[in-house]
Image (tube, rainbow, N blue to C red):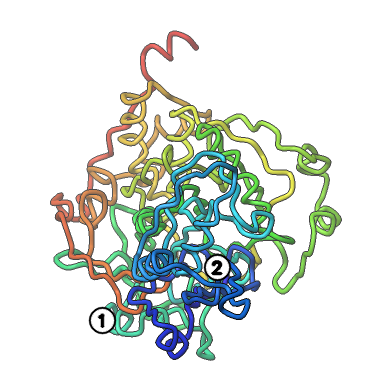
Amino acid sequence: MGKCAPPAASWARQHGCRSLVRPRLNASLHGQRGNDSFRVSFVCSDELGTPDSAHGGRIKYSASVRERYRRSMNSTFVLVPRGDNRWNYRFSEAVGACAIPVVLADGLSLPLEPLVDWSGAAGGGICVAVAATADRVGALHRLATSWPGLLSVAFLSHNFTRDAALGLRALAAPGGSLPASPGRIALSLVPNRPSGARPYVRRGRGGLFGDLFPPPTCCGISGDLFPTNLLRNVALDACGAADVALVLDVDFSFCCGDVARTLDRYARAVRADTGLSYVLPAFEAAEGEVIRSKGELLDRLDRSGAGWRGATEPFASPYTYMCEPYLLVHRSVLPPYDESFVGYGKNRLSLHYELAARRVRMEVAPDAFVLHERGSHASRSKAWWAGETCWPAFRKRVWEAHGFWRSSRRQRQLDANPRALNRTCGACVARSARLCVGSCRPELARWLPGSRKPTLLPPSGAPFEAPECPGGTAIASSSEPARLRKES
C-alpha cells in the first residue's frame, strides 16, 4: 500500500480547511498488495455536495457538513457505525481524512474488498518473526524479498551502541542496500552482552574472523550458547496487533507466486478456529537454484512426501515426537518459547511439543512451502546437545500443566544414560552458564514499522545465579510418569 495522502497544504489553506493530525496507515497497510500502491485524498470545500443551480451548477456543502469534515481531518480515530445498508460512505471519508476508521458494525461491506485486505489493516495481519545475526544478513535480505508483509526481526548485536545508532541500517548488506521494503520491518536489537551478565556468544561476527574467538566449553558442551528462543520471543513481542504468526528461521524464504494472498487464506481459517494451525513444508535448494512453482520443486525431489505431492486441499498431520515444522498459528494459542533452550537441540521442538500438549491441531498446506538455500549461512560451532540438559525440567513442567508426555526409543536411551551426552551440568546449561534468559530480559532498542526513533526498553530481572559450569554431577533425568509406564 502507498502512503495516506491528505490534500496539499496550499490547496487546504485556499479552501479553508487544514489537517492538524495526519496519522499514517502505512505500517498496517504496507505490503498487503506487494508493490501496488494507491493514494487517497480528501476534499473539504464547497466543491462537493449537492448541485446548486444558484451557484453556477457547483456542488455545495452546508456549514455543518464542512465542519464535520474539518473534525475528521483533525482526528486520529473516526467512528464508523453501520447505516441502513451493508456499506457506509463514512469509512471512505475517514480513510480520505487520513484518520483511522473504527468500524462499529458486523457484516459491513468495505470498499475495494477484492483488492484491499482490510483485515490486515485492522491488525489482523500475519507477522513473520525471525532471529538474525550479522552473518545472516544476506539470508535476511532473501527472506524480505520473498515476503511482502510484516517482518519482525530480533537482531543479536555484538556492538549494541553502534547498531542502535544505525537503526535499520544495521541490516544493510555489504553494498549498503537495505532489505526490501524496510518500512514494514520491526527491528529489535538485543545486545550480545547484557548488563551484568555473560555474553551469549563468545565469538566475533562470524566468518573468517570468528575463528579467532573460540566458542565456550561449558559442562562438557562445546559451542555457542545462542539464545535462539529468547530472540524468537523478542521478535514475536514486536509483531504488534498482528494476530497470526509464523516463526521462521532466517535462512529460509517463501515460494512461490502471491505468497501473501495464499497465506492470508490460511490465516482466515486460523482466525475462525484458533485450535488449528497450518504446516508449511520445508525443502532444501542448491545454492543459487531458482524454483518458481510446486511443480518445479516436485521435479527435483525423490519420491518422498507422497501425500503432499498430489494434495490440493489441506490434510491433517498428527503430532510426531521430534517433529518441528514451521507453523502458521494464531497468537492467542502460541505459548512463549522456553528460553532455557540455548545453543542447538530441542529449541524449536519444545514449542511444538507444548502446542501438541495444548491440543492445537496441524494441517499441511498443499500450496505453500519454504526453501532453505544450501550453503546460505556461515558455519557456526553448534552445541548440538545443549538442549538435552534442559529437556527433563521442560518435559516435567508440560506434564504437570497439561498431562502430556511423548517420547521415543532414542529419547528413553538418552534419559537412561545422560552422561553419554556429556550432560555433566548440575542443571540446564542456560542456568549453569548464568545466561540472561527466562525471567531475565536484556535491554532492547526497538523500531516499529514506520518509526524513525527507537523505543529503548530497560533490562529487567537478573541472570541465573547458579555457579558457572559446575562439573561432576549428572543432571537429574525426569523418568516417564508411573501412570504411563503402567499403560505401556
Q: Amino acid at mark 2?
A: Gly
Question: Which percent across, then down, holds residue 195?
Answer: 16, 68
Within 10 Å of the Cα at label 2, are there few (<14), some (14-19), or many (20+) other Cα atoms? some
Q: Residue at x 52, y 43 (%)?
A: 329
Residue 102 horizontal side relative to residue 120, left or right: left
Quadrant in which the N terminus appears: bottom right
Q: Is residue 21 above or below residue 121?
A: below
The answer to whether residue 460 of the structure is visible from this angle is yes
- Assign a secondary structure to mark 2: loop
Question: Which percent across, then down, holds residue 28?
Answer: 48, 62
Of mark 1 and mark 2, the one earlier in the sequence is: 2
Within 10 Å of the Cα at label 1, are there few (<14), some (14-19), or many (20+) other Cα atoms? few
Query: As rendered, which of 212 and 334 lies closer to the eye?
Result: 334
Residue 144 horizontal side relative to residue 407, left or right: right
Residue bearing the label numbered 1 = 161
Q: Are marks 1 and 2 in contact (CB under 8 Å)?
A: no
Residue bearing the label numbered 2 = 49
- Assign a secondary structure to mark 1: helix
Q: Residue at x 64, y 65 (%)?
A: 33
Please identify the quarter of the rendering in which residue 209 is found.
bottom left
The answer to whether residue 154 of the structure is visible from this angle is no
Question: Which percent across, then down, holds residue 317?
Answer: 64, 33
Q: Residue at x 44, y 57 (%)?
A: 101
Question: Which percent across, then down, holds residue 285?
Answer: 71, 63
Please identify the quarter of the rendering in which residue 305 is found.
top right
Q: Residue at x 36, y 80 (%)?
A: 167
- Can you tell which of label 1 and label 2 is closer to the viewer? 2
Q: Amino acid at mark 1?
A: Thr
Per the model, the C-alpha gap separating discs 1 and 2 is 56 Å
Query: As rendered, which of 405 and 256 lies closer to the eye?
Result: 256
Please identify the quarter of the rendering in which residue 402 is found.
top left
